[in-house]
Amino acid sequence: MVELTTEDCFGGVVRTVDDRASKLCDPARLNPVTGPIHVEGAAPGDLLAVHFVDITPRRDWAISTTFPHFGALTTTDETAMLHPPLDEVVWVYEVDTDRGVLRYRARRSDHEVELPLDPMHGTVGVAPAEGEVLRSITPSAHGGNMDTPEVRAGTTLYLPVNVDGAQLAIGDGHCRQGEGELAGTAVEAAMSTVVIVDVVPGAAPAWPRLESDDFLMSTGSVRPLDDAYRISQHDLVGWTGELLGLDPLDALQLVGQTGLAPVGNMVAPNYTMVAKLPRWALGGARAYDGLHERLRHAGAEYLARRRAPSGAYGAEKDHHQGAA
Amino acid sequence: MVELTTEDCFGGVVRTVDDRASKLCDPARLNPVTGPIHVEGAAPGDLLAVHFVDITPRRDWAISTTFPHFGALTTTDETAMLHPPLDEVVWVYEVDTDRGVLRYRARRSDHEVELPLDPMHGTVGVAPAEGEVLRSITPSAHGGNMDTPEVRAGTTLYLPVNVDGAQLAIGDGHCRQGEGELAGTAVEAAMSTVVIVDVVPGAAPAWPRLESDDFLMSTGSVRPLDDAYRISQHDLVGWTGELLGLDPLDALQLVGQTGLAPVGNMVAPNYTMVAKLPRWALGGARAYDGLHERLRHAGAEYLARRRAPSGAYGAEKDHHQGAA
Amino acid sequence: MVELTTEDCFGGVVRTVDDRASKLCDPARLNPVTGPIHVEGAAPGDLLAVHFVDITPRRDWAISTTFPHFGALTTTDETAMLHPPLDEVVWVYEVDTDRGVLRYRARRSDHEVELPLDPMHGTVGVAPAEGEVLRSITPSAHGGNMDTPEVRAGTTLYLPVNVDGAQLAIGDGHCRQGEGELAGTAVEAAMSTVVIVDVVPGAAPAWPRLESDDFLMSTGSVRPLDDAYRISQHDLVGWTGELLGLDPLDALQLVGQTGLAPVGNMVAPNYTMVAKLPRWALGGARAYDGLHERLRHAGAEYLARRRAPSGAYGAEKDHHQGAA
Amino acid sequence: MVELTTEDCFGGVVRTVDDRASKLCDPARLNPVTGPIHVEGAAPGDLLAVHFVDITPRRDWAISTTFPHFGALTTTDETAMLHPPLDEVVWVYEVDTDRGVLRYRARRSDHEVELPLDPMHGTVGVAPAEGEVLRSITPSAHGGNMDTPEVRAGTTLYLPVNVDGAQLAIGDGHCRQGEGELAGTAVEAAMSTVVIVDVVPGAAPAWPRLESDDFLMSTGSVRPLDDAYRISQHDLVGWTGELLGLDPLDALQLVGQTGLAPVGNMVAPNYTMVAKLPRWALGGARAYDGLHERLRHAGAEYLARRRAPSGAYGAEKDHHQGAA
């Protein structure tokens, strides 16, 4: 059980609609993460389970901004074109953790609406394989900046361990995020987060996986989305086949008729796809001997001790349902 | 109000696990559609609304199959590689419309599970623009084989009218389908379908849109998924901006934090992405003057006259929720 | 032997730097082609050989222009973004067929340079398969707007015949073009063109192929470039294997070490890649029983009769070498 | 002036047709490079010029092989599919540096042919920016495994300097390579190589550039090829505009009508495109104050001192022409 805090992706320096991330932020220090956390006993080839017990915004405001040449509907360094960048505009959201909402307020027009709070971490990863050192903004087989709203409280993330101690790092909290992180940034916020960490020897997945009460999930992070989709679905087919003892084509068929395929993010440098299998398709089979259920239970007990039954853990789950 | 029947994508000739679509089906006759239906009064530039009142499987069985060089985890004619095709295997599903389920039975291994019935049409389109004639398997701006599970009963599809009478065609019924149509085919079935058709003069969308009780949706059908994602989200940003009177960057921000982005299909020749905006983000604004609500109401009345309150319309809606 | 003339892609209406294609051209009439030419005796499944004997600009000027949302370094309808279009600017080139040059003159800055004339046709195709009707701007298995500079005089293009008479059409002449057609349009010109047409029964290629004195070439036209590259190289591997009696992996190895891979165009709606095998890698093997050589010889005789030895056929060949 | 030797991409352990790289090679040690070479005086923001004076194979044999899930016409870890890998087959080439040829010999069929020797380095790079550490197999903005045949003797490569001393590394010699490195490996060989290194303060390019006697070249290394094409052409447009004082759209037009666009490699993890501008389009303008010409001259003098006038430097140039 680890309690930690994270700063937002701007390092906390963008605070008003007049602050420009492109001027205030050192590119080499964007997207700071908390860690690395050395996990005692984690060795290369092991699986690291990171169960998110609680993710709570630390401030009553959060930030989103367009950023020059960043996002899915603009030219970028990689999708290079001759257009000048889109305007850099900042949105400041009011965050009400008690009511579980945040307030969107248009900047150049007249519209306000409350959005359900659905806190998540965009960046969770371990040290990469083969001695590589990657910027925290890069999602890949080691995790990293996958930016999928599935990394919310109540979910377990499974990562491969590549070095002794795994070297877990967590950051880039979002009060909520659409699928794809279309605008380049989500509703960025500093977080107070509680995770439970566990290790399964020798069970390292090739790509990050997730498990919630309702879904098994595989991810793929690469460009283009086509290949990220292939990686994530291919891994989910293999995982399903293994859990149910299925021939690969039988597993393909089952995933093909029941699986979901939301985008994580389509923001440089790599894009992330998520492949989701509803647990009802598994007929009672449990991944990793019920590890998620055990961590979920431990997390619920922790929260019960810490707060009233109506606390954030259950509430976040409800917000998610409201949002979906 | 139009009642029609559609044959499955194999023309009904694949009926047992020993039938091979690659031998029995004439490629030029794959994916047959019912139509074209001439819509009186529909003129180029108009919007054609197709509200799906009811989609009911006509048989107590349905078919899925791998097909040589077809699907998302195999080489195809377009993603050409040196591998021989995957084995051609057929799955026959038992369909129980009363209980709202279908039975998956593994072919080369030992697993069975009931899946929720969630009937939909993979192919719905009008005559393309600029005199083009396309195979029914191609999704594009005119609709076509978009293969998204969102085209289910209770949903309204908005298509552009390119020629007098629109020339609507509907086919490729699926008892259910995962996002992406990973295996190349869904649970393919002949359908009895009821639609209500309406026209909004001069309101042709650039790409097909959908509306359900819970979401506004835009689609994009092109390769790769990156560009299909861009088209669909770009259209949804524009639509949202128009409905709420928002500046484009304000609309980008709102969609960016609240939108969903599931894959429709990643099967040749074009891939389809869907962009979904939850209606709660719209604060009461209604598209096309509440057209979906009116059609939804008319459809419900039709079903109420036709059957008992426990009929398929409501039931399908429930299956959807169960599946999601 | 067919002598024909073609209009430029604007239908000849853009003539000065003040003409705007976006205003003057009807989108439904862009990229006009000459034809269809009914080829007596060509039947579905046959190969149609189109040998280009001569391609000569008909005017002493030619046009290039940026066009809103068209080209490889701008947002397009398919790569949809929030940027406004790039400025629409027109370049008028002086064409000197005697000297074999054209003059580039910068519009917003001060630079002039003579470029070698290297005339080609961007669009050459037959009726598509399976009853499809496609805009002339779409390149696909039937040919169409492939926009590769390889379609120059001295080259033979091999197309599949899909309908009786093949229905050959030719247009979109370019005085020259870079690989990729980066700016969206090439140096567009009306042409006087001479082709020899021949048929090989039952030898229809899956995708258009080309043959010059120096190279065998396969093409692939699809999105993204990755898949266009795969199609073209896959076809070249198969063709090479067939000509030399090679195992597929032996053919892969030979093409892999000797083949070239230039972009044709990366302009919507499909992208084209060319795969080129130097003839010296073939050790004397000849495609289609030396058809290219026979057509080349017939073309040379025709030109010798028509003009002095220093005529355009030889000269174009030299320009090509100068340009490469 | 640096003389160095490099081992082949297999570390020299694959020597016969019976050796399997997948068994003999440690993945973490594939593609070894010689270096890092600390370049005195090179500071972040500078341009590092690496002129290739001579690249000569060190053995009279060289190796190519298919490798499981590696190459452009096979499923890979990133383009994940359900096919088993292609067979692992090894080709041993005889290398005759005197005659400037290598001998291809089919393994599973009966064909032999001599190919022109055209030695090059697949991997040349410096330390990446922002503290990243990447495997030598990854091409990116720092250079790396770009695998373009343009990196041959007589060519100057321009790299950005990201850390003090630049930390240049060179490896992955190829006796020759097709564009795209279709089969996953080229004709892999240990090399004796001579380079001249120079520094231009403050002139770091965003992406690696090259210069030969005939072309200016920009590169882009990313997935998919579409974006690699965009990066490389965008950089070439910018470079051309700067050299000639052109407005961006004027530069786009000039590159658009004269530029070439060959694939470097389409092998994981990133793909490389090259954008080439013929020097005749520049009207005498010289990049970096004629740096390439000075290095070219110094290299020629070095070779003249070292060997007879018929030596390898000139000969390689001829082989290139033979190959193209």
Image (tube, coloured by chain):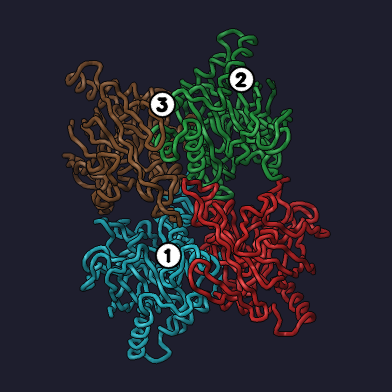
Chain colours: A red, B cyan, C brown, D green
> As drawn, which residue projects farthest toward the front?
A18
Per the rendering, the mark at residue D54 is 2
Instruction: Give the class, few, some or many, for how many residues have Cα within 10 Å of label 2's Cα (few <14, many ≥20).
Output: many
In this view, the residue in front, A202 or A64, is A64
Which quadrant would the N terminus of chain B be assigned to in this image? bottom left
Locate residue C207: give its quadrant: top left
Q: Quickly name the residue at label 3.
A: C324
Q: Chain of mark 3?
A: C
Residue in the picture at 59% in, 49% down: D77
Residue in the picture at 70% in, 84% down: A310
Q: Quickly name the residue at label 1.
A: B238
Amino acid beneath label 2? Asp
Amino acid beneath label 1? Gly
Per the rendering, the mark at residue D58 is none
Q: Chain of mark 1?
A: B
Q: Position of residue B293 (x, y in %)?
A: 38, 82
Q: Say if labels 2 and 3 share a chain.
A: no
Amino acid beneath label 3? Ala
> As drawn, which residue projects farthest toward the right?
A40
Is disc 1 in contact with disc 3, using a CB cutoff of under 8 Å?
no
Is disc 1 in contact with disc 2, using a CB cutoff of under 8 Å?
no
Q: Position of residue D193 (x, y in %)?
A: 65, 22
Q: Say if labels 1 and 2 share a chain.
A: no
Q: Secondary structure at mark 3?
A: loop
In the picture shown, does residue C216 fall above or below B90?
above
Residue D309 located left or right of residue D22: left
Q: Position of residue D47 (x, y in %)?
A: 63, 32
